[in-house]
Image (tube, rainbow, N blue to C red):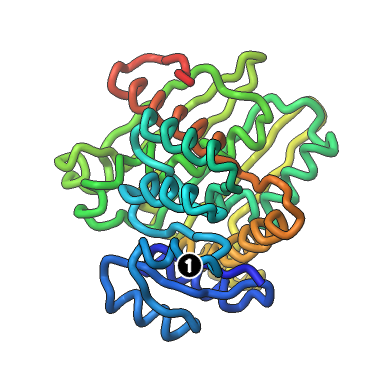
Amino acid sequence: MINFCQFGAGRIGQIHAANIAANRRASLRYVVDVHEAAAKRLADEYGGTTADVGAALADPEVDAVLIASSTDTHADLMERSAKAGKAIYCEKPIDLDMQRVKTCLEVVDAAGVPLMLGFNRRFDPSFLALKAGVRAGRVGSVEMVQIVSRDPGPPPIEYIKVSGGLFRDMMIHDFDIARWLLDEEPVEVYANACCLVDSKIGDAGDVDTAAVTLRTASGKLCQISNSRRAVYGYDQRIEVFGSAGMLQAENLRPTSVVHSGAEGIHSDPPYNFFLERYPQAYKAELDHFIDCLETKTAPSPTGNDGAAALALAEAAVRSYAERRAVEVEV
């Protein structure tokens, strides 16, 4: 039984707490959140108790931490957890500043504790099947990857102001998937973006619509399309094109029923948002983390994967600001 301390009792924290409680190999021992009432509600529902950071990390019965708190707390909690000897499962990103990420990873490496970054899309059954097909050579040599990721609507402006921006907050998932599928590091990024959804997002210093092209040293290309508004639902599609063919992962829908009639052909729209679209992925990544702790193997995605995805986001920010293609700084 792996005993968890979870940091964060918000929306994503509720998903993780439920998955820990439902996993026969895991137990939720503590929930820690600055909002004590939220922490207590979650702990009461899933069999844990509340505590402050120091008390939770001092408990020798705690084997691992799951960090689902706000981004600005991730690096500090990772360092404190590593020094306490706890295995770490942290939601993306580690931090919004690359130097802070590097310093944090040095502390975790020195402590020698397992670390996994929460890039949950790698664990989605459809994306895993697509990756397996690529690995098996079904598309031949990969030449182009296209990733579409569009939210049904923008988050609150208050969140936009502290999120680090679309490239670091939203597209970072797509940067990780791009690296995973290309199986080669992008060396050049060209980004273009604008505000077409809500002018208040622009007033807050961010963008809501973006298109990015990545190029690897061998010439493989990846195109990423992001929007903060898709009126038809949560749009999540991937295409991998190569010398021998193409693989596609299409949107998932609540049912596969299609009605054809005189008025046209109709099906269910895509799932509404990530909580409905990726429940299997969240469960699978927890299983993977526990598997690795039990077998004493290194979990993946790693802290270095988190740093590499942030490096692509930083390159996209520079490219958009300078209106040119830029090299990726590692």
Disc 1: CA contacts within 10 A as few (<14), some (14-19) or many (>=20): few
Q: Position of residue 128 (x, y in %)?
A: 71, 50
User: Which quadrant would residue 61 be assigned to in this image?
Assistant: bottom right
Q: Position of residue 279 (x, y in %)?
A: 57, 67
**Measured along the vertical axis of the image, is residue 236 above or below residue 207?**
below
- 21, 245: nearer the viewer: 21
- 115, 147: nearer the viewer: 115
Left or right: residue 255 compared with residue 34: right
Q: Position of residue 156 (x, y in %)?
A: 24, 57
Residue at image x 60%, y 19%? 216
Q: Name the residue under label 1.
A: 59
Residue at image x 53%, y 63%? 270
Left or right: residue 260 compared with residue 32: right
Left or right: residue 141 compared with residue 171: right
Image quadrant occupied by the N terminus:
bottom right
Residue at image x 48%, y 33%? 106
**Badge count:** 1
- 99, 140: nearer the viewer: 99
Numbered disc 1: secondary structure: loop
Residue at image x 85%, y 38%? 136
- 184, 258: nearer the viewer: 184
Q: Position of residue 127 (x, y in %)?
A: 67, 50
The amino acid pointed to by label 1 is Asp
**Measured along the vertical axis of the image, is residue 95 above or below residue 212?**
below
